[in-house]
Image (spheres, rainbow, N blue to C red):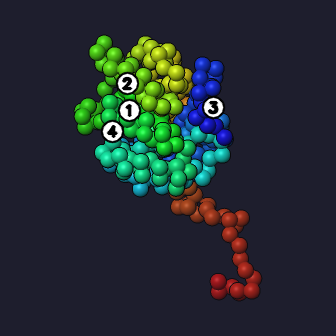
Amino acid sequence: MVTVRDLREQMGETPITMLTAYDAPTAEIVDEAGVDVILVGDSVANTALGYETTVPVDVDQLASHVGAVARATDEALVVADMPFLSFGVDEAATIENAGRMLKEEGASAVKLESGPHTVDITERLVQLGIPVMAHLGLTPQHVNQYGGYPRQGTDRAAADRMLELAEDHADAGAFSLVLEHVPSNLAATITDAIDVPTIGIGAGPHCDGQVLVFHDAVGLSEWTPSFSKQFGDVRSEMESAVDDYVAAVEDGEFPAEEHSHQEGDLGDIY
């Protein structure tokens, strides 16, 4: 099974692959494909639960999905994304919520949308045996503060702050760092500056690995961000299958004789 130590050893040798998953069937597919890390993202809010942003999803909802993914995963490292306001408000609550993902749901690590306020949190969680994946750049839980999902680190001052935060989180014990929607040259600079693997999403090719939302990667989403890529067209396949099912039922073609059976002892009235 992939561990946080394995990712460190893989850094600079073989690119790290990470995808999201929110349920057992998806986790099985991702795991069997040999993906290194499965992130049970708070993106479950807008990919699977019908919310417009990631903000509404809570600890109980996320925990349920983490458990489903962990039970279906044999090899990949399962990382639980900590929901909005589940960390950083109160230290005891932060520890309890993060610890629950490992102790009760079977994750191996947690991810925190990071900032100056999460450096000490990261250090404390790591001290307690909870591996932490940091996340800088575009942090979707701040959508109401950003007023959308803009690129981050696009001027020198912002880039310098991000580099400093990356170094601070690495020093605090984070085992990896997600960089989202930042200039590729900034991501390259951060990757060179810290001794833990960087995993990019919309951050160019110079990170130690890449991550995408599963629904975007397989073509299940109606819309995908500009920095993503569809590697399939699952949505069209599903639409076609459902259309065929409806037509078959309405035309009387399903169920056919092979899809049912009769019990002779019941007689003709049944």
Image coords of residue 149 (percent x, y): 32, 30
Q: Amino acid at mark 3?
A: Asp
Task: Give the residue number, with chain letter if any, for mark 3.
Answer: 6
Question: Which of the marked residues, 1 or 4, is nearer the chain's N terminus?
Answer: 1
Q: Residues within 10 Å of mark 2 (few under 14, many from 20)?
A: many
Q: Which mark is residue 119?
A: 1
- Mark 3 neighbour density, 10 Å: few (under 14) some (14–19) many (20 or more): few
Distance of label 1 from label 3 (alpha carbons) = 23 Å
Q: Which badge, 2 or 1, comes first in the chain's sequence?
A: 1
User: Quarter of the image containing the N terminus?
Assistant: top right
User: What residue is rendered at 47% in x and 34% in y?
Assistant: 133
Q: Are marks 2 and 1 in contact (CB under 8 Å)?
A: yes
What type is the residue that disc 2 sits on? Leu
Q: Say which element carries label 2.
A: helix
Question: To which quarter of the image does residue 223 belong?
Answer: top left
Left or right: 113 in relation to 32: left
- Image disc number at residue 165: 2
In the depicted structure, whether residue 248 falls above or below residue 55: below
